Structures are given as C-alpha cells and as structure tokens.
Amino acid sequence: MLLISLVATAVLGVLGVVWGWLAGSHAILFDGAYTGLGLLLSALSLHASRIVTAGPTRNYPFGREALAPLVIMIQGIALLATLGYAVITSVLTILAGGSEVEALSGMVYGAVTGVIAVGVWLFLRRQAGYSDLVKAEAAQWLAGLGLSAGMLVAFGAAAVLEGTELAWLTAYVDPAVVIVAGLVLFAIPLAMVRETVRELLEGSPPASVEGPVQAIVDAVSAEHGLDAPTVRMSKLGAKLYLEVDYLVEAGRYDTAFADRVRQALKAALEGQPLDVWLNVDLSTDATWQH
C-alpha cells in the first residue's frame, strides 16, 4: 500500500511542479511541493514499516514499534512547516499586488489531481486496517484532495469574474487559494503530532482500543470470581501493552489459578487487531498496585 502511494505521489509531484512552473501559479507549485514532500515522507514510512515488521532483535528485545509514531510525528511537523511557509509566502504575494494565472489551467489541474487523490485516499482508507503508518498516509492524501478541491472552486470563481467589473480580484485568487488551503489543512498534521506524542509518552490508548479490551478483562475477571483489577494499558504503534493486577486474599489462590486467568485473558484477547503484550499478576499487597 505504501509503495502504491509512493508511485502515485511521485507522479503528482512531478506533474504539480512542471504544471505550476509553466502556468506561473503559486497554488499549483505549492501543491507540487506539498506532494514532493509527501514523496519523501512516504519513503520514510515505507522504510520504518520494514524495520518495525522485522520484529524484536538482540539489541531491541521489545521490537521497534516506537518508530511508527516517531515517523508519523516527523511527517506532521514537516507538513506543518510546509503549510506555514506557503501561507506566509502567499500573504506576501497578496501584499505585492497578487499574481495573474490562467483560470482554466488551474481548474483542469485541480480536477485531474482531485480524481487521483480521491482514488488513492479511498484505497488506503479501505485497506489500512489498524496500521497507523497507512492511516497517516491516507491523511496526507485527504489533505491533498482538499487542496485540489479548493483550487477547482477558486479558479472556477476566477473564470466567472473574468470580463466583469470584479476582474481585478482574479490576481488574488491564486495566493488566496494557498492561504485558505493551508489554514484548512492545518488541523490534519496537528492531529498527527498530537496523537503520536501521546503514544510516545505512553499515554492511554484511544477509547476505540481501550473499551473492548477493558470489557474483555472485566468479563474474564467475573468468570473467575475475581474483583475488578487495576488495569494499565498503553499503545505504541501496533503494539498494546496491557498490565492486569489483581488484589487477592492471602492463601486463597495458587500459581496454577493465576496461570488459568492469564490463559483465559490471552485467549479472549486473540481477536484484537493489535499485538497485545500481556502481564497478569495476583498479589496480596494492597500498596503494590499504586
């Protein structure tokens, strides 16, 4: 999936830079540069995916799942920087009197890139499953789709204004498209950075992950006559660390019982999409859980 995205990104990146240079359009050049950056980030995601799927090694006995959120955070920061630079440049262009761009050229470009972007985005979204790297890739294509749609609408409006008393506004359409797109798309990389920082700091997983796992723990605990345990979980890439600690009466349970609880939890969690690293403990020390 990442390879398919990589090829499509390369095609659109070259198309945007060449088209934007020939048309003299800041918006199209920005789209080409944005896509070109996406090419580098896709290659980085692909490399990280290969390292992560290689599994644990002697130097990394717990694997290298942290690479996935780290790469996504780098992607988000790079996209934020690109959007910020594009917005500032476009503001300066407006202050300088705008720039003339053929409206029809911008409309055609927006339509062509929009069709490609929506196709790749739908493909990645349907096939992503629980891969954070592929989801991040799909988010980049969604951002690109938004930019293409914005160009199509803006240049269409410019075409309508040509030959009217408001024709002078057409000089500001091109930089205005970049500013609006940059501000609208800002939320996507910001969310990428926010979520990955949470993972790297070992925060609790999203409710969509935490809820089903907690329900399984509750059901297994009730089945074995145990009180509600202290549950800690943290998601890191495709890995879910799960610690389940029970406070029990001294002398009531033995190691074999603890093994049965552990096996029951392990079997019930096999249907979860993430790689669950499970730790189950029974203790008589009330202070140990805190």
Image (cartoon, helix red, strand yellow):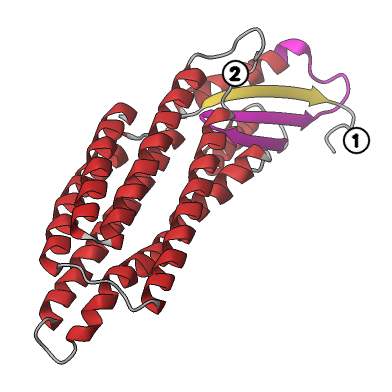
Q: Earlier in the sequence, mark 2 or mark 1?
A: 2
Q: Is residue 73 above or below residue 245?
A: below
Q: Which mark is residue 63?
A: 2
Q: Is residue 35 above or below residue 175?
A: above
Question: Does the stretch in magenta take in 241?
Answer: yes
Q: Report the Cα–Cα distance between label 2 and label 1.
A: 31 Å
Viewer-proximal residue, 218 or 23?
23
Q: Is residue 215 visible?
A: yes
Residue farthest top in this picture: 58
Viewer-proximal residue, 150 or 120?
150
The image shows residue 140 at horizontal and vertical percentages of: 37, 47
The image shows residue 277 at horizontal and vertical percentages of: 61, 23
Q: Is residue 130 visible?
A: no
- In the rendered image, which residue does mark 1 sit on? 287
Residue at x 41% of width, y 78% of height: 95
Q: Seen in the image, is 256 located left or right of residue 189?
A: right
Q: Nearer the viewer, mark 2 or mark 1?
A: 2
The amino acid marked with disc number 2 is Gly
Task: Give the tally of numbered discs.
Answer: 2
Q: Quadrant of residue 42?
A: top left
Element marked by disc 1: loop
The segment highlighted magenta reads 228-257
The amino acid marked with disc number 1 is Thr
Q: Seen in the image, is 79 located left or right of residue 7?
A: right
